[in-house]
Amino acid sequence: MNPGDIEKEKPDEPAIETRGLRMRYGSADVLRGVDLRVRRGEVVALLGPNGAGKTTTIEILEGFRRRSAGEVRVLGTDPDDGDEAWRARLGIVLQSWRDHGRWRVRELLDQLGRYYTPYSTAERRRPYDPQELIGLVGLEGQAEASVARLSGGQRRRLDVAIGLVGRPELLFLDEPTVGFDPQARQEFHELVRRLADLEDTTILLTTHDLDEAERLADRILILVGGVIVADGGAAELTRRVSGKAEVRYNLDGEWHAASVEDAAGYVRGLFERHGDAVTDLEVRRTRLEEVYLAMVRDFESAGHAEVPGRLAEVPA
Ligand SMILES: Nc1ncnc2c1ncn2[C@@H]1O[C@H](COP(=O)(O)OP(=O)(O)OP(=O)(O)O)[C@@H](O)[C@H]1O
């Protein structure tokens, strides 16, 4: 079977699907039955406190780590059985990657890109042209710089370029924007949206930046205590925790605030009653960060036994 054939397999199958995924390190159960589905073309953010098992999950999906139990399919293949053709369809940006110090940026991308040439298809030309990729991640000024001389943020941009060089169908990003300045972060967000919208790339990312998750992801998964405790769009998760919005406004020079369920109705009434006397109107719903912290707190204060039927021992 050649790589072209593989790409045409089961187009409706989700890019990622796990059922009852479990991982035990020694006697510690880190993943206790993770069920997740990521549709093709979706951008999904995996959130969770330090040590929740996000990297472990991603590494299992990438085929870097063998799971203890459960079913996993990534682009139609069990990662434990993934071959080179399967790997060529993935893009991976790890939390840290330190090597290639003497290489120059363009040279490195050119070399790494050659690995993907045999896996080029009519739908997905592989690899990216190094110069185009350098422009895409904003490293034009560093194309001829040696890797050891890049700043932390530039190095991270290169990590992203390395993850993209094979024009992946599925891209894993583990805390991709750590060390980015605000402008680099914004450019990176635009890049991710462009990859998802124009190149139909499926993206699974982990981040501790809740604003980033909200801005980038079609869907957010919260991993706590080894299970997914919440799954939905940012607005949906926010509504689930707090249906209320805060309306602030100035009326005849005095500030007012109200916590209301129907913000649109409240604002309509406000203008009907006071017209132009209302100024500086602001409607603010609960921020994702508050929602996230409330969910983690609830889970932790309930004790982990609150997730029924999911905490059984992983078979040794
Ligand atoms: N190779 C290993 N052997 C033993 N324990 C491990 C191993 N790798 C990870 N762990 C443990 O598994 C748990 C989950 O780690 P993991 O790196 O997956 O978490 P994470 O959610 O990615 O955390 P962070 O947000 O800090 O990156 C942690 O308690 C960690 O100490």
Image (cartoon, rainbow, N blue to C red):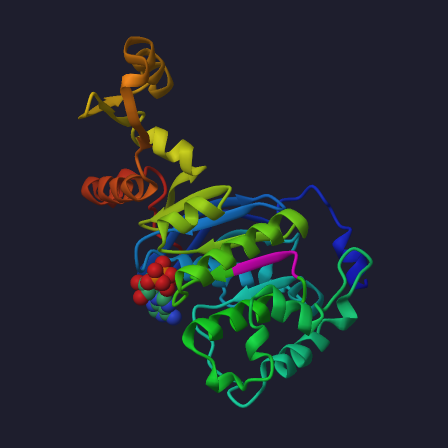
Q: Reply above or below: 281 against 273.
A: below
Residue at the (30%, 44%) spot, across then down:
289
Can the viewer see residue 26 in this picture? Answer: no
Residue at left offset 81%, top offset 63%: 2
Q: Reply yes or no: does residue 134 show up in magenta.
A: no
Say which of 148 and 266 sits in front. Answer: 266
In the figure, 297 relative to 107: above or below? above
Find out whether residue 170 is within the magenta segment. yes
> In this view of the protein, which residue sits in the foreground, 267 or 238?
267
| Rendered-image quadrant of the N terminus | bottom right
Give the quarter of the figure containing the C terminus.
Answer: bottom left
Write down the region rendered in magenta: 168-172
Q: Quadrant of residue 92?
A: bottom right
Regarding residue 12, the answer to whether it shows in the image is yes
Percent across and percent down for residue 123 are 78, 55
Residue occupying image coordinates x 26% and y 44%: 293
Q: Residue at x 59, y 73 (%)?
A: 140
- In the rendered image, residue 301, in percent from the top left (x then y), is placed at 18, 42
Q: Position of residue 229 (x, y in %)?
A: 36, 41
Q: Quadrant of residue 117?
A: bottom right
List x then y, in percent, for residue 86: 68, 63
Is residue 215 rendered to the left or right of residue 43?
A: left
Between 81 and 281, the one lying in front of the other is: 281
Position of 174 compared to 16: left or right? left
